[in-house]
Image (spheres, rainbow, N blue to C red):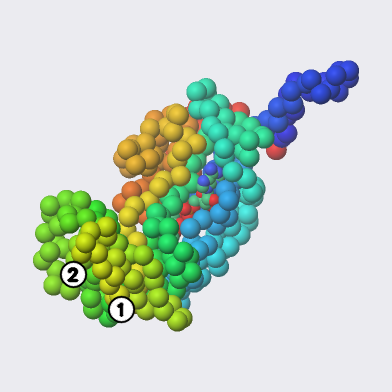
Amino acid sequence: MELFKSLDLNKEHKEDVKIENIEKVKCLIIGSGPAGYTAAIYAARSNLKPVLYTGLQMGGQLMTTTDVENYPGYPDGVTGPGMMEDFKKQAERFGADIRFGIATDADFSGKTHKVTIDDSKTIEADAVIIATGATAKYLGLEAESRYAGMGVSACATCDGFFYKGKDVAVVGGGDTAAEEATYLAGLCRKVYLIVRRDVLRASKAMQQKVMNTSNIEILWKHQAIDLFGENGVEGVTLVKEKGTPREEIVKLQIDGFFLAIGHTPNSEVFKRFINTDPTGYIITIPGTSKTNIPGVFAAGDVQDPVYRQAVTAAGSGCTAAIDAERYLSESHTEIPSK
Ligand SMILES: Cc1cc2nc3c(=O)[nH]c(=O)nc-3n(C[C@H](O)[C@H](O)[C@H](O)COP(=O)(O)OP(=O)(O)OC[C@H]3O[C@@H](n4cnc5c(N)ncnc54)[C@H](O)[C@@H]3O)c2cc1C
């Protein structure tokens, strides 16, 4: 239901009248990855009449990958875009209202939650599900986009299997890098861990694990500057001891190049009201999707610094829709007519 507030067409000076474009909905879902679409499926089937805004990347992170082989229900694998099209169709089948638009501001100070879309429209929602995902950090090399899906990955759990028995490099020195290197060491012939400094930031336990894994070799004080290969990554160009008299260029033959330098959760718009950890991941009450604001829920990678998988995101989207449904039935809010 579109409500145009403060609009009086009989006024002489129409240009002076501020037109506020406000729409009231019961359940607003922000984000169209596995978490957002799953929340939409469950919310629509619970008669919450969800409105979902897709954000810039309709379908989420999986739109940037070719093969998804670990999502249950697809025994022969599926392409990322193909799978997300299936999610969308399923949500639409139950009446979810899926729209293109970006949440640009939020005000969760009142009982009704307000979210601004594209700086031009306000959605007033009784319940909001934030499913805006997280974005993997890259080094910023031109080669990373040139070889996207052809040997460059930011997810060892997702893509490690494709490099079984091969040689790979992992970039990073923190816990994630140590974990990804150890995981890949169980699949690959050789794992080079490319570390900019001469120490690892990873916890002592993770460092021990890396040091005790025979097929991981740590390349201290190395920085990746380029990738090479004809039809995909065949190697990485590194600079060793950059800026010192001992600086040298090193070329390494590898089949896969894994970034493990962190993710940025897409929570900026909500941070004024929603509690996050120091990295920006939304904090939810353990075992639920509830945030610190009643009626605002979070699902998927935006609240998950640990697992970050499609199936875990979808699972938490389901949790968020069920939490939202229970919250709404307990708070006896009016169902707006659509
Ligand atoms: C290259 C690659 C390959 C992967 N392969 C696999 C795999 O094989 N198997 C697997 O399980 N996982 C894989 N993953 C991880 C998986 O994609 C994520 O865990 C999953 O997509 C997270 O789902 P999500 O719904 O939380 O967020 P996302 O998929 O990140 O979706 C976030 C959504 O929020 C929207 N959004 C963001 N900000 C706003 C805003 N301000 N307003 C409105 N909308 C907004 C975006 O447009 C997007 O639609 C892969 C990831 C990558 C990058």
Q: Counting other residues with Cα less than 10 Å from the Cα at mark 2, is it few (<14), some (14-19), or many (20 or more)?
A: some
Point out residue 158 in the picture as x, y percentages from the top left corner. Answer: 37, 66
Viewer-proximal residue among 120 and 286: 120
Point out residue 142 in the picture as x, y percentages from the top left corner. Answer: 46, 64
User: Which of marks 1 and 2 precedes in the sequence?
Assistant: 2
Tag 2 near tag 1, CB within 8 Å: no
Viewer-proximal residue among 199 and 259: 199
State the CA–CA distance, disc 2 to disc 1: 14 Å
Q: Counting other residues with Cα less than 10 Å from the Cα at mark 1, is it few (<14), some (14-19), or many (20 or more)?
A: some
Give residue 324's mark. Answer: none
Point out residue 72 in the picture as x, y percentages from the top left corner. Answer: 42, 66
Q: Secondary structure at mark 1?
A: strand
Q: Quadrant for the C terminus, please.
A: top right
Quarter-wise, where is residue 144 in the image? bottom left
Q: Residue furthest top?
A: 12
Residue position marked by numbered label 1 in the rendering: 253
Q: Does the image show residue 284?
A: no
Residue position marked by numbered label 2 in the rendering: 217
**Amino acid at circle 1:** Gln
Count every numbered label the image shows and give the total: 2
